[in-house]
Amino acid sequence: MARRTFAIVSWGYAGTSWLAHALDAHPDISAAHHGKQNLEALGYSLDARLYVEVLKALAFEHALVGDVHSLNRSEVATLKTALGDYFRHAVVVREPLARLRSALAHYHRSNFVGWDLTYLETKMREAGYDWDSLSLAERMTLLAVNNLDSARFEIEVGPFYRMEDLVQNPSALTDLVQHLSAGALGNSGGWAERVIGEGARNSHSMRASIELTEFAMEALDRLVSPQSWAIYGELGYTKPASAGAM
């Protein structure tokens, strides 16, 4: 069987750690999680093509090799051009408010340290925010809300898979594998049922205690575009009432 490669695109807090673990547990798949950024943190700067070749070299015995939550849209386009039909991609999403709570829980646990918000400042000023008067917690809230607007750009990468389906439905998880492998792989030996039965990994335990403030809900109105809300609606997610009617 010719070896295939893949990328799962996500801005995070959608269950990507669990998904990488689940895919990597398949006997014919090797899946890295956030690997490119982890290598960069160690001082190794790799372009997308070289990164994928490294993954293939490290997992030479697997039929399908790829990454979850490292590669962006432009890198996916580059790989598609270079690798053609032997490279597949998909986008993983999650219910917007649950995802927002997970992001904020993670930010709180890190004490809002280690985040470069330089690129965000200009956009938030254009959106009408007085950046200088915002607290760090408010700035991080805007970062998390702004990321929810990625759906309108991620649709260019597609197809979309809902994490709620992947963690509960073996058929949905198998469908993702069939898509990534162009039909070459499936639910080998009850793999999907097994990994789903193991339960969630790396859950942001604080998320239930994170209450979305009026500031956050107002930001949903201001920063998440109608295009993104329409995509969420098509995926079966309900737009919060405070963010206007769907």
Image: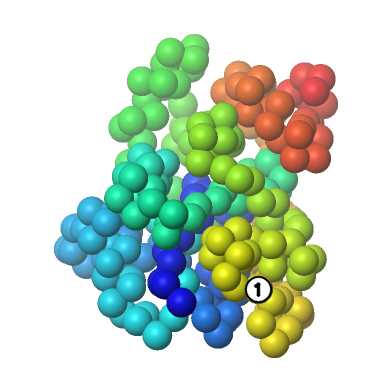
Query: Looking at the rendering, which quadrant does residue 15 occupy?
Result: bottom right
Q: Position of residue 213 (x, y in %)?
A: 68, 34
**6 w.r.t. 227: above or below:** below
Left or right: where 95 falls relative to 142 = right
The crowding category of the residue bearing disc 1, from other C-alpha atoms within 10 Å (few below 14, some 14 to 19, many at least 20), is many
Q: 83 above or below 224?
A: below
Q: Quarter of the image for the C terminus: give it.
A: top right
Q: From the viewer's perspective, tell me whether residue 92 is left or right of residue 88.
A: right
Residue projecting furthest to the front: 1
The answer to whether 98 is drawn above or below residue 173 in the figure is: above
Residue 174 coordinates in the image, percent (x, y): 69, 68
Quarter of the rendering containing residue 200: bottom right
Is 19 situated left or right of 3 in this image? right
* Viewer-closest of 125 and 170: 170
Depth check: give the residue in front, 99 or 94.
Answer: 94
Residue type beneath disc 1: Gly
Query: Helix, strand or loop at disc 1?
Result: loop
Q: Position of residue 168 (x, y in %)?
A: 78, 66
Disc 1: which residue: 186
User: Front-most of 114 and 49?
Assistant: 49
Q: Measured from the top left, where is residue 187 in percent x and y?
A: 69, 77
- Residue at 49 percent of width and 15 percent of height: 127
Q: Which residue is located at x 54 percent, y 65 percent? A: 181
Residue located 34% across and 50% down the image = 79
Q: Residue at x 56, y 48 (%)?
A: 91
- Image quadrant of residue 244? top right
Residue 84 in sight here:
yes
**Does residue 137 sit above or below 108 in this rendering?**
above
